[in-house]
Image: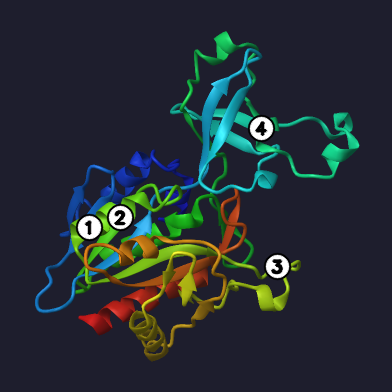
């Protein structure tokens, strides 16, 4: 499921293909599915009797680009959709528009740059998309302003027990929710496959208002810092050490009771875990926690290297351990 979900194109606001595939996996299950006006796919597994309603959330969208103008020369100007470091864009392969036209990010050749230009990252305004068009008229036959653009990257096995692909943030969370929904178990929860997280956690706001949970768990991908250029004390998470339980992030102070329940569930089920030690990014948790009269909310994340880039890397054991942890936590709440 991770491979198929990762390969889908679904920039924020254009999650239809991802939603359709997820719904396809669930079509023969007993879960009840609805799609709201925003485009969230809401799935109810079982009926709550005398217990708090639990919501699991994972967002379907990925970061990407949008065509903003077509130059007279046929080159395409763009804006990022979601948070993308422009340093990862240069010379990357792309898929443009509904037809998935091949393109590449172009830039001024280094030997034509002035000394000051060579010493700083490319400005977004100096980059463009090259699809091989010779003129604006030719480009307009295939592309229009507002078309979405995704990285042209396929999910593949890498090394011993690793995977490389795009959009692991947060197709990995979607895969975890799907696994729990498809299992033959008696767990009772609501699953929200949400939209537009990367541009302000918009779908989660609507989903939480609709589902009215008392407790929520956001299932995310999070940045791993276990690379040679990162000081040990600055490493947020490590691949191979299990799912990361958040203490806080830029959007929330995680509910202490939910966090402790997650630790206890991991310990009881002998599932390895770690704490997420980086707090600079926001998640859907902050939005969900403020829904209606308030929701006790936690976050569990799969560590990924090179997040928000064309090539993310995760370790399969962390993905499986995340499923095991959340299953154990849900069982303890039933």
Q: Are the two marked residues, 4 and 2, in contact with CB atoms closer than 8 angstroms?
A: no
Sooner in the amino-acid sequence: mark 2 or mark 3 = 2
- Position above or below: 311 against 135: below
Q: Farthest residue toward the top?
A: 137
Give the side of residue 140 with respect to residue 252, left or right.
right
Quarter where residue 37 is shown: top left
Q: Are the two marked residues, 4 and 1, in contact with CB atoms closer than 8 angstroms?
A: no
Quarter holding the N terminus is: bottom left
Residue 227 is labelled as 3
Classify mark 3: helix, strand or loop: loop
Sooner in the amino-acid sequence: mark 4 or mark 1 = 4
Disc 2 crowd rating (10 Å Cα; few below 14, some 14-19, many 20+) is many
Residue 125 is labelled as 4
Q: CA distance from mark 2 to mark 3?
A: 34 Å
Quarter holding the C terminus is: bottom left
Residue 240, how many percent across, how many down? Answer: 57, 75
- Position above or below: 249 against 260: above
Q: Are the two marked residues, 2 and 1, in contact with CB atoms closer than 8 angstroms?
A: yes
Quarter where residue 329 is shown: bottom left
Give the side of residue 20 with respect to residue 12, left or right.
left
Q: Observer-nearest residue: 223 or 153?
A: 223
Residue 265, how many percent across, how many down? Answer: 36, 85
Residue drawn at x 37%, y 59% is: 58
Classify mark 1: helix, strand or loop: helix
Disc 1 crowd rating (10 Å Cα; few below 14, some 14-19, many 20+) is some
Residue drawn at x 47%, y 77% is: 247
């Amino acid at each position: 499921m991770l491979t198929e979900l990762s390969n889908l194109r679904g920039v924020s606001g254009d999650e239809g293909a991802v939603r359709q595939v997820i719904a396809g996996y669930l079509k023969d299950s007993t879960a009840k599915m609805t799609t709201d006006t925003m485009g969230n796919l809401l799935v109810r597994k079982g009926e709550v009797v005398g217990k708090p309603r639990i919501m699991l959330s994972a967002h379907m969208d990925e970061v990407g680009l949008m065509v903003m103008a077509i130059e007279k020369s046929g080159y395409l100007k763009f804006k990022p959709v979601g948070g993308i470091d422009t340093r990862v864009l240069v010379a990357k392969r792309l898929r443009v528009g509904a037809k998935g036209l091949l393109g590449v990010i172009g830039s001024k050749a280094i030997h034509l740059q002035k000394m000051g230009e060579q010493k700083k990252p490319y400005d977004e305004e100096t980059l463009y998309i090259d699809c091989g068009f010779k003129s604006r008229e030719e480009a307009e036959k295939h592309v229009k302003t507002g078309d979405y653009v995704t990285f042209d990257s396929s999910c593949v096995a890498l090394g011993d027990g690793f995977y490389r692909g795009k959009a692991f943030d947060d197709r990995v969370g979607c895969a975890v929710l799907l696994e729990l929904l498809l299992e033959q178990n008696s767990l009772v929860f609501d699953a929200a496959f949400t939209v537009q997280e990367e541009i302000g956690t918009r779908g989660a706001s609507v989903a939480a208002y609709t589902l009215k949970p008392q407790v929520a768990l956001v299932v995310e991908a999070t940045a791993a810092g276990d690379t040679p250029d990162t000081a040990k004390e600055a490493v947020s998470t490590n691949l191979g050490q299990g799912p990361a339980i958040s203490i806080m992030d830029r959007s929330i102070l995680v509910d202490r009771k939910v966090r402790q329940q997650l630790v206890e569930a991991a310990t009881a089920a002998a599932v390895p875990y770690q704490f997420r030690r980086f707090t600079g990014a926001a998640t859907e948790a902050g939005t969900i926690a403020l829904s209606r009269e308030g929701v006790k909310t936690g976050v569990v994340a799969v560590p990924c290297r090179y997040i928000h880039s064309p090539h993310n890397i995760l370790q399969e054991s962390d993905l499986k351990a995340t499923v095991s942890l959340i299953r154990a936590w849900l069982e303890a709440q039933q």
